[in-house]
Image (cartoon, rainbow, N blue to C red):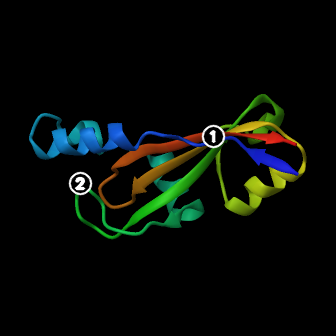
Amino acid sequence: MVAIMPWVSHGLSRMRLIRDYKAGLVSSESVQDADFLLVTAATFHGYPREGRCPICDDDTLRTVYWVYGDELKNRAGTARSLEEIDAFAAEGLTFDLHEVEVCTSCKWNYLLRTSTVLPE
């Protein structure tokens, strides 16, 4: 058995950033800054999201999951599929899970939620 601790949502700060961008208070460079690795991870390991990109209005918005933690060893700091995440949890490992929204078109990205996976 595994337990995913409650998610910490960053939705409110996301909404503020989008509002500020649309009001011209934030530059496009500061919101469209996903690096090559993040965009590639979203393309190959990500899952399509409902809705459109809040920045460019394209339909290429994806969710990618990143795992972090000492118990993962060389697998830490990588994007993983939900199946791989389930396998890590089944091994009884403790790790942090980050859910990131990425637009593969304009490079918008935002950390949506974080949680910790613990063995039960």
| Residue beneath disc 2 | 55
- Identified by mark 2, the residue type is Ile
Q: Is residue 30 left or right of residue 80?
A: left
| Residue beneath disc 1 | 115
Indicate the secondary structure of the residue bearing disc 1: strand
The residue nearer to you, when weighing 80 against 6, is 6
Q: Is residue 79 left or right of residue 48?
A: right
Q: Can I make out residue 67 in this image?
A: yes
Which mark is nearer the camera, 2 or 1? 1
Indicate the secondary structure of the residue bearing disc 2: loop
- Identified by mark 1, the residue type is Ser
Q: Is residue 85 left or right of residue 22?
A: right
- Residue, far front: 6
Name the N-terminal-most of marks 2 and 1. 2
The residue nearer to you, when weighing 73 against 8, is 8
Q: Residue at x 61, y 45 (%)?
A: 66
**Placement of the C terminus among the 4 image quadrants:** top right
Q: Position of residue 103 (x, y in %)?
A: 37, 57
Q: Position of residue 34 (x, y in %)?
A: 39, 44
Q: Residue at x 55, y 61 (%)?
A: 46
Residue at mark 2 to residue at mark 1: CA–CA distance: 26 Å
Q: Residue at x 12, y 34 (%)?
A: 25
Q: Residues within 10 Å of mark 2 (few under 14, many from 20)?
A: some
Q: Position of residue 119 (x, y in %)?
A: 86, 41
Q: Can I make out residue 33 in this image?
A: no
Q: Residue at x 73, y 32 (%)?
A: 69
